[in-house]
Image (cartoon, rainbow, N blue to C red):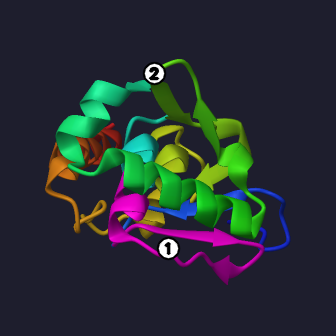
Amino acid sequence: MFDITSDKVYVKTFGGFDLYYQGELIYFSSSKAKELLAILVDWSGKEVTLSHLAEILQSFHLAWHRLKQTLKKYGIEKIVIKGRGTYAINKEAVVCDSYDMVRQVKGASNFFVGEYMPEYSWAEVTLSNLIRDYFDEGES
């Protein structure tokens, strides 16, 4: 489903959150930086305000600094859009398993086994929506 030679970043949300670029796993220097990116992915391209992010992540500014460093190290800074007091994932620059499932890309639901970013409790809302949509799709 995903071309590992692609210039797009592959975002894995099913079974755990990870990022891959050109077939290589992206390593984060901070779990909070990784969680920050996971939140942006969860919001699916919608802008997330600084105040909302600060409510979830106690040390937002440090997490943002480390996330920027990591993305720059891999040359993939384009996947995050920073606005005036807002942040978003650039959906055009990534391929994401859950985005493909929602868009009903053929075969995408094969990777969904009932887990969506299980390491983050805030992701349970999206998980319940995915389960509902997955089973509704299966019934039609």
Residue 46 visible in this rendered orientation of the protein: no
Name the residue: 38% across, 65% down: 14
Tell which of 36 and 69 is nearer to you: 69
Q: Mark 2 or mark 1: which is in front?
A: 2
Q: Which residue is mark 2?
A: 85
Q: Which mark is residue 37?
A: none
Residue 31 included in the magenta stretch of the image: yes
How far is the residue under mark 2 from the one under mark 1? 23 Å
Amino acid on which disc 1 is placed: Phe
Q: Which residue is mark 1?
A: 28
State the extent of the magenta-drawn residues as a range. 16-36
Tell which of 105 and 59 is nearer to you: 59
Amino acid on which disc 2 is placed: Gly
The quadrant of the image that shows the N terminus is bottom right
Which circle's residue, 2 or 1, is located before the other in the chain?
1
Within 10 Å of disc 2 (Cα), the crowding (few <14, some 14-19, many 20+) is few
Name the residue: 42% across, 63% down: 34
Q: Position of residue 48 (x, y in %)?
A: 39, 28
Name the residue: 59% across, 54% down: 68
Q: Position of residue 135 (x, y in %)?
A: 25, 47
The secondary element bearing badge 1 is classed as loop
The quadrant of the image that shows the C terminus is top left
